[in-house]
Image (cartoon, helix red, strand yellow):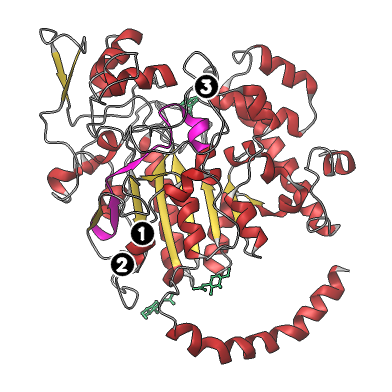
Amino acid sequence: MARTRGAIWAWLSPLLVAVSLLLLPAAMAGDSESPIKKVVVLVLENRSFDHILGWMKRSVNPAIDGLTGSECNRVSSGDPSSPPVCVTDDAHFVVSDPPHSFEAVQQQIFGSGAGAGEPSMSGFVQSATAVSPSLARGVMSGFPPEKLPVFAALARDFAVFDRWFSSMPGPTQPNRLFLFSATSAGATAHVKEELARGYPQRTIFDSLHADGLDFGVYAESLPCALFLRSLRRLRYAGKFHRFAAFKEHARRGRLRSLSVVEPRYFDIAGAPADDDHPSHDVANGQRLVKEVYEALRAGPQWNQTLLVVTYDEHGGFFDHVPTPATGVPSPDAARGPPPARFAFDRLGVRVPALMASPWIKKGTVVARANGPTASSEYEHSSIPATLKKLFNLSSPFLTRRDAWAGTFEHVVGELTSPRTDCIEVLPEVAPLRGTGAEEEAELSELQSELVQLAADLQGDEAVSRLVAESSGRMTVRQASEYVDDAMAGFLRAGREALRMGLEDSTEVDVWSGLASRTRFQ
Ligand SMILES: *[C@@H]1O[C@H](CO)[C@@H](O)[C@H](O)[C@H]1NC(C)=O
Ligand SMILES: *[C@@H]1O[C@H](CO)[C@@H](O)[C@H](O)[C@H]1NC(C)=O
Ligand SMILES: *[C@@H]1O[C@H](CO)[C@@H](O)[C@H](O)[C@H]1NC(C)=O
């Protein structure tokens, strides 16, 4: 059957080329048509705007709303006699993971645990000190631009968004869910069982698919995108690829409308984590961004491409911009768990956001969103909102949140032709960490969630139970191998689904559908 389809295609494609050539002048004349046909999204882990880009105000671009050096928090936030800890420009690779649960972030934003009043951004030091006094300086530290040369180069050549917030004031997974579905379906924390089951909401991938547009998810190992149940459907099995395939697709001009690149979350000798999560070396995250950019820049689709790089949430690091707390719509009827019963009616802390495209003017700084409502802001739901606009998607908005979020298509809307002077090779990045990977370390929450996902993917109840009971029983090395195997099985299953022509035909997910047939060997 695949053969027949191939033959028809071979016969049809010259015809389609001829037809599209006829239509070309009309398309070029339409002024509402965006030049961007390929969007690439890369989201790193757990760092605030000021921590990463704050000091770029000093030496890269004074228009950036960054740090001046006079931003401080007091050890005891409500007490004017308590000693201040001020921002420094000496961030280095190693800070143990600062607190950033929903409750901790509430204290960081409001200076108290009450979660009421005006956001004062005064409780970061207090929240860190509660964990360990030595963390206080760490959360107030920012990187000097020369330590992040890839970001400094992108900021000089393209655009920094200096008012882009995480979607909710809490940890990784709820924010990652917002990226592609504009809601976390009520999650304010990491709920392992829910993640393993997969969150049920509609996603931007479904909206693209409904209009016949394609996407790809590229990851060296299992991607967090699979925590969205919709992406586990058999019909999407062929959309997942290794990172090497990203470079290959970019080189051959095969990138889809949306490409999602996920970093490596496990730190192994020879395969270092490049997600920027403390204490992983940010030099590796810089190298990942460099590889992604250079692959796009050298590829034949560069003139139609927009690269978006941001961070899921602020990871407990200080930021001075008050998080928007009024006029933010709840995405849907879902509420957080008691006692807070959070209504998702304020945003999280500001995070770094950079964009690159030959259609962006050099040295652009984008501040506040301009509509669609008076209170609109840039946050992760701006990604699905902008995709809907760029690609004129016929599906409705995913939630009330992406209907409200600022869209950024204007950042590629000002030039009349693509720039030809865009930087081709980004700077080399020296390692910041002098020690090797801690392969024997205990798993982080995110790592143990990926192990659980891998266990479910393979129907491995024994490991699933083990992980549900405790995350400390596997080392990072063991977990990494286990998750990599599951990824290999998942990709095999995807190829098998394509071979069997199942991908168009079914709503069933890979678990119940293909797993039983291919057994993931
Ligand atoms: C980032 O923080 C979350 C909590 O928000 C944590 O569970 C996760 O493990 C961290 N990321 C990584 C890669 O460890
Ligand atoms: C992109 O457009 C510029 C200007 O029109 C052109 O010089 C360049 O060759 C194009 N690059 C690619 C990869 O098509
Ligand atoms: C967007 O799609 C609608 C149909 O959903 C169509 O009527 C309209 O012309 C399209 N706009 C553009 C700019 O293509």
Residue 187 - label: none
Q: Is residue 401 above or below residue 252?
A: above
Local secondary structure at mark 1: strand
On screen, residue 107 versus residue 515, left or right, reads left
- Looking at the image, which residue is at 63% across and 91% down? 18
Q: Which of 85 and 208 is in front in this view?
A: 208
Which of the two discs, 2 and 1, labels the residue nearer the N terminus?
Answer: 1
Q: Ligand 3, what quadrant?
A: bottom right
Picture coordinates of residue 323, whole percent (x, y)? 30, 33
- Image quadrant in which you'd find residue 220: top right
Q: Mark 1 is on which residue type?
A: Ala
Q: Nearer the viewer, residue 326 or 52?
A: 326
Answer yes or no: is residue 267 visible: no
Mark 2 highlights which residue? Answer: 422
Q: Mark 3 is on which residue type?
A: Ser
Mark 2 in CB contact with mark 1 (< 8 angstroms): yes
Local secondary structure at mark 3: loop
Residue 444 - label: 3
Mark 1 highlights which residue? Answer: 356
Per the rendered image, the range of residues in magenta is: 156-176
Disc 2 from disc 3: Cα separation: 38 Å
Q: Which of 373 and 89 is in front in this view?
A: 373
Which of the two discs, 3 and 1, labels the residue nearer the N terminus?
Answer: 1
Q: Name the quarter where the C terminus is drawn.
A: top right
Q: Mark 2 is on which residue type?
A: Cys
Answer yes or no: is residue 55 visible: yes
On screen, residue 79 versus residue 518, left or right, reads left
Picture coordinates of residue 53, whole percent (x, y)? 26, 41
